[in-house]
Image (spheres, rainbow, N blue to C red):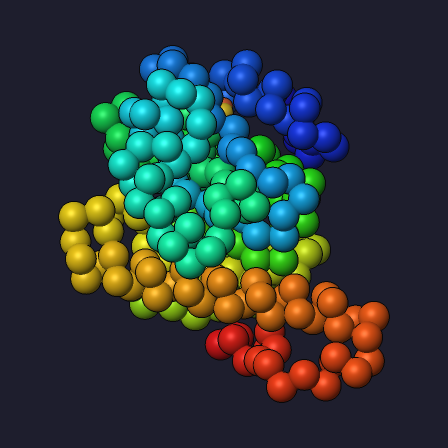
Amino acid sequence: MGIQSYFSDWQSLEEAIKHCHKCPLYRSRKNPVPGEGNKNSYVMFVGEAPGATEDEMGRPFVGAAGRLLTMILESLGIKRESIYITNVVKCRPPGNREPKDEEVEACSIYLESQILLLKPKVIVTLGNVAGKKIFGMGSQQWGGVMKMRGKACKLSILNLTILAIPTLHPAAALYNPQLRTLLEEDIKLVKKITESIAQETLSLGDVQKSKSKTKTLLDYLK
Ligand code: SF4
């Protein structure tokens, strides 16, 4: 098979994922999970792979870990429907094992197409697999989630300038209060940064407002 080109619309992308046999994960999946949310959002959340509940329902982050993430988002006033959320691989690895490198590679065209269609300004990576993939796409070294979390990093991905904000996978925080606190701190940072972006976007057309003393995006960069 030759080099596959990017999908130019959401419908053909989602249709292709539904019928995809590009890696062995299609054999054990019940439903592929393309992703969902606001396709005009400038914030994208990327997790690792669907789990059992996601596989049943064909929707991302709807199991216990997803509910925790939704709760944290909403406690900070971020509506889940306002963001776009997906995973590195779109089909559930058996027994929830980590996806293999070759599965991540086979599925990459879908995530890349989603990034090109959405053109997010911010990508929040949930866990090591997502962090490694997104930082790899930005040709940056991934140092592990505990080292990378809690700060934003400017990446150039597919010719787009994107702020990556790595954090833990909510599944890791489910039964660990310390990790949950870290996850909450990181999501607070996401909120601050997205508010700054909203402010900067608004102030573009208003010279007076551009003198605002609120933090700018640059203040959050490493
Ligand atoms: S995980 Fe990705 S590449 Fe593998 S079958 Fe599913 S959609 Fe296709």
Give the image location of residue 125, x and y in percent: 44, 52
Point 38% across, 14% down: residue: 30
Point 42% across, 50% down: residue: 74
Residue 24 position (above or below residue 141): above
Point 66% across, 70% down: residue: 199
Q: Who is closer to the viewer here, 192 or 50?
A: 192
Residue 143 position (above or below residue 89): below
Instruction: Say which quadrant the N terminus sits in.
Output: top right
Query: In this view of the protein, can residue 106 be seen by the observer?
Result: no
Q: Quadrant of residue 26?
A: top left
Q: Who is closer to the viewer here, 103 or 164?
A: 164
Point 68% across, 22% down: residue: 12
Give the image location of residue 180, x and y in percent: 25, 57
Q: Who is closer to the viewer here, 197 or 124?
A: 197
Residue 129 position (above or below residue 15): below
Residue 40 shown left or right of residue 85 in the figure: right
Give the image location of residue 23, x and y in percent: 45, 23
Q: Who is closer to the viewer here, 147 or 9?
A: 9
Q: Quadrant of residue 209?
A: bottom right
